[in-house]
Image (cartoon, rainbow, N blue to C red):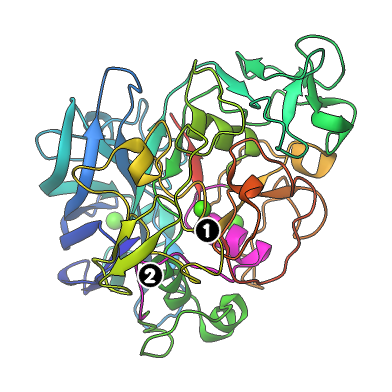
Amino acid sequence: MKQTILHVALLLVCAIGLRANNIQTANVLLTGQNTSSNYTQIAFDISWENSWRTSTNESNYDGAWIFAKFRKKNTSLWQHATINYVSPGNAAACGHVAAAGATLKTSSDGKGVWMYRDADGIGAVNWQANSIQWNYGADGVLDADSVEIRLFAVEMVYIPQGSYNLGSGGVTETARFRDGATDTYLSVNSENAIVVGNAAGNIYGYGNTDMAAGSIPAAFPKGYNAFWIMKHEITIQAYADFLNCLDLTSSNLRNPGGIGGSGIHPALQPVNPERPMELLSTVDLLSWLDWTAMRPFTELEYEKACRGANILPIADEYAWGNTTVNFINTASNSGTSSETYAVGNCNYYPYIVGTTMRVGALATNTSTRASAGATYYGVLEMSGNVSERAVAAGYSAGRAFTGVHGNGALNISATYDIPSWPLNTGSGLTFKGGSFNDNSTNYIRISDRTFASSVSNVRTAGYGGRGARTAE
Ligand SMILES: [Ca+2]
Ligand SMILES: [Ca+2]
Ligand SMILES: [Ca+2]
């Protein structure tokens, strides 16, 4: 996540760029204030590496989820900025300006914008002189108020709508999803409710485990409809950015340790900003997702994002679509922003590397899906590195989830406050993908559900996460 800080007097002034992961924003400024309609433009440049858009096979693209926080001078509360949304959300309707080659689109709740390629291509993007319209009047800011603005950008991958197969039929995958009548995968062809049972077309947990009777409701995101998922795990920098925007008491409450580096709140500066945040409790993760106006992904969406649409599963496959795993070894530039590994496609088992790996460390200009450890759609670290909490489909605690997004604000206890999101204990969440701190290769298989009902709120090494957003 990338942020830029603006100190604004009368909605004008200067910007500072902070370093973070791969994605960079620069030249952030407020311009074009309209005191009649109470909006101003947030202008910015943005760049990141390894971008793509393709209309063959995967037919998908990467992009950025961009949102802004502001605070009035002499206040400590960073609030979420309301971006102009006029249906259908495109730049022309919403008053945004996108550089040539880019698409800007506001989410219908006005919590942010997506930015992505408007045509097929591959390689780095560097889009300058973009702007998005901030409806400051809707956020209680007066024409003459002094405010600071921070602009954040998170790399995402677009997962297109399409049918896919759930479960692989692999014999080592605990509690795996399967068709009700036969021990093989189940085709998911819509977002309609899926009945739990032992008839063909029903869903079933292998061995009748971690799949309560009833059905998975229509409103539960199943991965058939399009969604965005973060390209990487949440980085330490992205989590530090969040803590730096909370008051000290809240930051201490949400800080599990592990930030490292120099600086004290509200200027925490991680020593390894590009490594994934670990030690996250359930509440830490879900609060970060609420604050960034994203949502958790479901375990069904995880399988879709890994396996791809209309792809026959390979029994016991890993995120990169086969059953061969090579653990990373032989690091170069360890702990830096250019950390790479000469060997391997997955960070797993504590006795090999013994710590987290820089996100994106295995993706290069010449890497393949298998060598980068990437999913069908190009999502990274979905097997290994840090383990990721997903909404579980097996019990009522998770089935209540309807895909509601965070609204950018936490309650007074610095905690997520969306009633339909899973609670911090119980059976509403699962871990997917395994971590460097695990010791069974089963956990890194796409369809393994070993943890389908056993996520607790503890802060443990190897516990991280990532976010998602329903596409529009
Ligand atoms: Ca006005
Ligand atoms: Ca992972
Ligand atoms: Ca909230």
Which percent across, then down, holds residue 247?
51, 81
Magenta segment's dominant SS is loop
**Quarter of the view holding residue 373:** top left
Residue at 59%, 78% (x, y): give it: 256
* Residue range (magenta): 271-295
User: Does residue 311 lie above or below 221 as drawn?
Assistant: above
Q: Report how far apart the C-alphas of labels 2 and 1 lie in the structure.
A: 22 Å
Residue at 63%, 39% (x, y): give it: 298
Asked whether residue 95 is in view, the answer is: no
Which percent across, then down, holds residue 461?
60, 71
* Other residues around mark 1 within 10 Å, as few (<14) / some (14–19) / many (≥20): many
- The three-letter code of the residue at mark 1 reads Tyr
Q: Which residue is mark 2?
A: 237
Res. 348 mark:
1
Residue 346 forms part of the magenta stretch: no
Residue 208 in the figure: left or right of residue 5: right
Residue 420 in the figure: left or right of residue 463: right
Residue 385 in the figure: left or right of residue 389: left
**Quarter of the view holding residue 401:** top right
Residue at 40%, 49% (x, y): give it: 345
